[in-house]
Amino acid sequence: MSKMESLDNEFFAEVKFVKKTEIENRTCDVVIVGGGGSGMVAAVRAAECGANKVIVLEKTGRVGGNAWMAVCMFAANSASQRVAGTQICIDEIFKSAMEEMEWAADPKIVRKYMENSGTLIDWLETKGMAFQPHVWHNTPVMMMPKRQSQHPGKDPSHGPGFVGSTVVETMLKEVEQLGVEILLKTKATELITDENGRVTGVVATGSDKEIHINANSVVLASGGFGANKEMLKETFPQFFSRETSICRLSLGHSTGDGILMAQAIGAQRGEFPGILLGGPSHHPWSFSVHMSLCRPECVWINKNGERFVDENINFKGYYAVSKQPEAIVYGIYDAATRDYMIEKNDVGTDPSRRDIIFLKGELEKENDGKRVIIANTVEDIAEGIGVNPSALAETVERYNSFCKSGYDADFIKSKEFLRPIVQAPFYAVFGHRFFDTTHGGLKINENLEVIDTKGEVIRGLYAVGDLASGWVTQRYAPTGASLSWACNSGYMVGEEVAK
């Protein structure tokens, strides 16, 4: 069982729902479908702004969703950023993001979201959260310098314990004080509409009964569809048409429920959905081993025993890996390069690179003939990864000649990254393609209202977080936007539904 599957089972196990004969009727001002980052923020903000009764439906055994794993959050012009001098003009960020997305996103939605981003941070800080302002690739982000609370995990690229889970835990404290009701292991299955097409509630199924909830407003916050293979193939055929190895970091509850329910009553799918791609990745296993695979000193070998790219492409090798046999890769390096990676360890401002100090021990732990192969000869490495020994030996010999001459005649990799494969033991690290969660699903307007296939607003129905479109495209910008959009859209919709 993979680490991510274990997380799915332990934290987000979905109850086995069956049709119930007992029906319970409930009434509230606002019902929110999904208790992730967007749903929890929406619940708190709606209650604060005057919604008398707010109910959150969460189909798993705990709230948090994919936000539980998120590390940082985009923000512009918050009070703490102004003090730290890391704020960047919203006009500048807006223009840059829209140009990066070639103006395919909805500028009204993007503008409103960005203008609210500083307000959101100020609001979270009044509730006890403490951020570290940072600028990453010219984008202002809010981070936490170290893992918060007692959350386990040595993978600094993912939570829990960073910004996402801290937002959720902060909102949990707030809902207790505000009287918001959270129904766990309760799955929304159908939207209720009146004769005019207005959404007036939801049908939900719990472990022991069916619940009909009448509400003035319904907010869909149930996340994307990263764990729904059929929807992935339908929406992104260019990425998922092949039945080859790929790793997802979105949790198993992301099955597109909200999108499907809304489509059943005539909602329109949004244009230009996005998905965050990467590779090669060694996730969901040891992060230090993954980091070694992505280091430019590593040599990437396909199933033909051939090198196919300048390895300095790092984590942006999705397309290059996709073209290889079975869409998998093995990262090859020797003991000297292993020690060099550990010693070099140029972390800079990226705390995730510190984890590579665990590399030697983690390689030995994963030496199972599948995830990591350790051998004393190149021929044994070839046998371990299932490639022709002569082909691999020829590739290694050619690469070593490049290291000696200081010139990569095949892919022009920088001389500084050319390290020969000569000192046993030798290592082969398995890698494959990677994707995070999906971005976009339902078409909305700048007020977060869902739009139908005729271009009209579906009254009483709102969408936030990863299942809402218009805020992003396949050109993902700005950095840290997924969690930021989730929380900002939740904050803004809370105010809308409370009116």
Image (cartoon, rainbow, N blue to C red):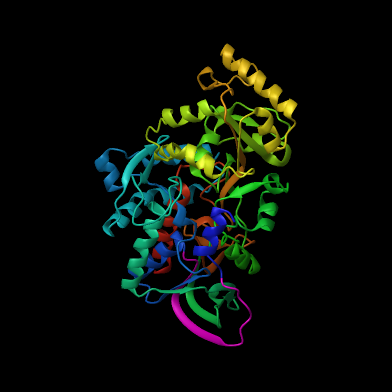
Q: Is residue 383 magenta?
A: no
Q: Looking at the image, can residue 350 be seen?
A: yes
Q: Position of residue 105 (x, y in %)?
A: 54, 46
Question: 399 left or right of 32?
Answer: right
| Quadrant placement of the C terminus | bottom left
| Stretch of the chain drawn in magenta | 15-35
Q: Position of residue 190 (x, y in %)?
A: 60, 73
Q: Position of residue 129 (x, y in %)?
A: 30, 55
Task: Please state which of residues 398 and 253 is positioned toward the viewer in this rendering.
Answer: 398
Q: Residue furthest top?
A: 405
Q: Residue furthest front?
A: 376
At 54% from the left and 81% from the top, the residue drawn is 212
Residue 102, picture quadrant? top right
Q: Is residue 24 magenta?
A: yes
Q: Residue furthest left?
A: 83
| Quadrant placement of the N terminus | bottom right
Task: Please state which of residues 173 and 47 is positioned toward the viewer in this rendering.
Answer: 173
Q: Looking at the image, can residue 250 be seen?
A: no
Q: Position of residue 338 (x, y in %)?
A: 50, 30
Residue 425, picture quadrant? top right
Task: Please state which of residues 277 and 3 is positioned toward the viewer in this rendering.
Answer: 3
Question: 495 left or right of 219?
Answer: left
